[in-house]
């Protein structure tokens, strides 16, 4: 089941699986009041890459969402790339990890950690990555 967190014009969707894993991480790291920072930075084989970190509080100008007892911090620049994205956690035999389904990405690396947007001029190209083979 998907749960959506919204502001007036921006939203990010977390799945129940993602919420559960984030809560477990906060307990394991003994930082129950921290939040999860989700961000986009330059780099990766497709031009932009996702990142996540546990942080004690939001920074000035952050978008702050709370869902299912989990706080998310997203800076304004990253929010431009992450608006309407769904954050999930998938567990498989090859290992688990967070997966971001991002409607703003027109192509993504095979590992799903980097992506390109329409604004980058790569509408129909696919990224290749030596680390995702």
Image (tube, rainbow, N blue to C red):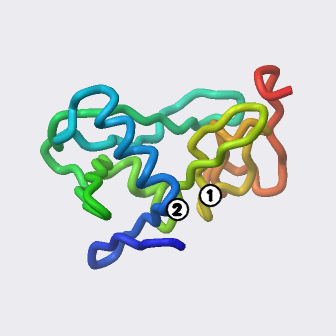
114 to 30, vertically: above or below: below
- The reply to whether callout 1 and callout 2 are in contact (CB within 8 Å) is yes
Circle 1 residue: 101
First-in-chain label (1 vs 2): 2
85 to 37, vertically: above or below: below
> What residue lies at 35% left-to-right and 46% top-to-bottom?
23
Q: Can you give x and y, in whole percent of width and height, for residue 79 in the image? A: 39, 55
Q: Can you give x and y, in whole percent of width and height, for residue 12 in the image? A: 43, 64
Q: Can you give x and y, in whole percent of width and height, for residue 64 in the image? A: 23, 56
Circle 2 residue: 85
Total marks drawn? 2
Instruction: Compare residues 81 and 50 and report the one nearer the observer.
Output: 50
- Name the element at disc 2: strand
> What residue lies at 34% left-to-right and 29% top-to-bottom?
28
- Name the element at disc 1: strand
Classify 10 Å Cα crowding around label 1: few (below 14), some (14-19), many (20 and above).
some
Q: Can you give x and y, in whole percent of width and height, for residue 90 in the image? A: 64, 48
> What residue lies at 45% left-to-right and 45% top-to-bottom?
21
Q: Is residue 96 left or right of residue 38?
A: right
Q: Is residue 91 left or right of residue 15?
A: right
């Amino acid at each position: 089941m998907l749960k959506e967190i919204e502001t007036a014009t921006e939203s990010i969707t977390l799945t129940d699986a993602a919420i559960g894993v984030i809560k477990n991480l906060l307990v394991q790291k003994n930082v129950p009041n921290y939040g999860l920072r989700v961000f986009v930075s330059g780099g990766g084989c497709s031009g932009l890459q996702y990142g996540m970190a546990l942080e004690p509080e939001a920074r000035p100008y952050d978008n702050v969402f709370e869902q299912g007892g989990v706080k998310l911090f997203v800076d304004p620049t990253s929010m431009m790339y992450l608006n309407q994205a769904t954050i999930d956690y998938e567990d498989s035999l090859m290992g688990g990890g967070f997966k971001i389904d991002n409607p703003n990405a027109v192509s993504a690396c095979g590992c799903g950690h980097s992506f390109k947007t329409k604004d980058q001029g790569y509408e129909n190209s696919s990224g290749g990555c030596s680390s995702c083979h």
